[in-house]
Image (cartoon, helix red, strand yellow):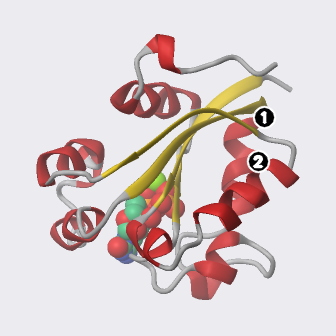
Amino acid sequence: MARERTLAIVKPDAVKRNLIGEVIRRIEQSGLQVAAARFLQLSRADAEGFYAVHKERPFFASLVGYMCSGPVMVMALEGDDAIKRWRDLMGATDPAKAAPGTIRKDLGQSVEANATHGSDAPETAAVEIAYFFRTIEVVARG
Ligand code: CDP
Ligand code: MG
């Protein structure tokens, strides 16, 4: 199992409902560790850049508007197999289809307002972490 880092975001819907602590509680309980954290309000350009891979998708404009609708908590997580473990903790994109006990099932409101983001592969994790954090801001926990 490789030691990995992944990007996690507590999205605006979850921040508005005061669920930052609940998400971090689940992260820490799972054994993953927070290696970097920032609380910030994304601009439209920030959200468009972050989700550039989805710019041709029908949901892109709505997704960008939603991601700018309030502050987000952005974190780099570290651990063995962290990318898959964080995706498993989050559950499927659509809360209605997510497995019981996952963050999106328990805390998500809709396919768009689904509480959290997680990177999907080592390459995207590296790009996404670098989008928000300088090298010096990510602290090794292992
Ligand atoms: O976040 P995840 O990797 O599970 O899903 P994605 O396919 O990479 O989509 C990115 C984000 O777009 C999702 O987390 C949703 O917030 C949003 N989305 C949406 O609004 N409508 C869809 N049909 C699919 C995704
Ligand atoms: Mg994705």
Q: Is the C-beta separation of discs 1 and 2 under 8 Å?
A: yes
Front-most of residues 141 and 4? 141
Which quadrant is home to the C terminus?
Answer: top right
Q: Is residue 141 left or right of residue 118?
A: right
Pinpoint residue 52: horizontal percent, then vertical percent: 23, 45
Question: Label 1 to label 2, Cα distance in Å?
Answer: 6 Å
Query: What amino acid is at disc 1?
Result: Asp
Q: Residue at x 58, y 81 (%)?
A: 95
Direction from residue 47 to residue 121 in the image, left or right: right
For mark 2, give the secondary structure: helix
Vertical relation: 51 (above or below) 13: above
| Residue position marked by numbered label 2 in the rendering | 85
- Mark 1 Cβ inside 8 Å of ligand 1: no
Q: Residues within 10 Å of mark 2 (few under 14, many from 20)?
A: some
Image quarter in which the N terminus is found: top right
Indicate the quadrant where residue 60 lies: bottom left
Q: Residue 124: percent from the left, percent from the top? A: 46, 33
- Is the residue 64 above or below the residue 79 in the image? below
Residue wearing tag 1: 81
Residue that appears at 54% across and 41% down: 75
Q: Residue at image x 40%, y 17%?
A: 134
How crowded is the residue under tag 1: few (<14 C-alpha within 10 Å), some, or many (20+)?
some
SS for tag 1? loop
Residue 128 position in % (x across, y down): 42, 34
The amino acid type, in three-letter code, at marker 2 is Arg
Q: Is mark 2 within 8 Å of ligand 1?
A: no
Is 52 left or right of 134, judged from the image as shown?
Answer: left
Question: Does residue 105 lie above or below 66 as drawn?
Answer: below
Residue 68: mark in rendering: none
Residue 24's spot in the image, x, y percent? Answer: 69, 55
Tell me what residue is drawn at x 34 percent, y 60 percent. 71
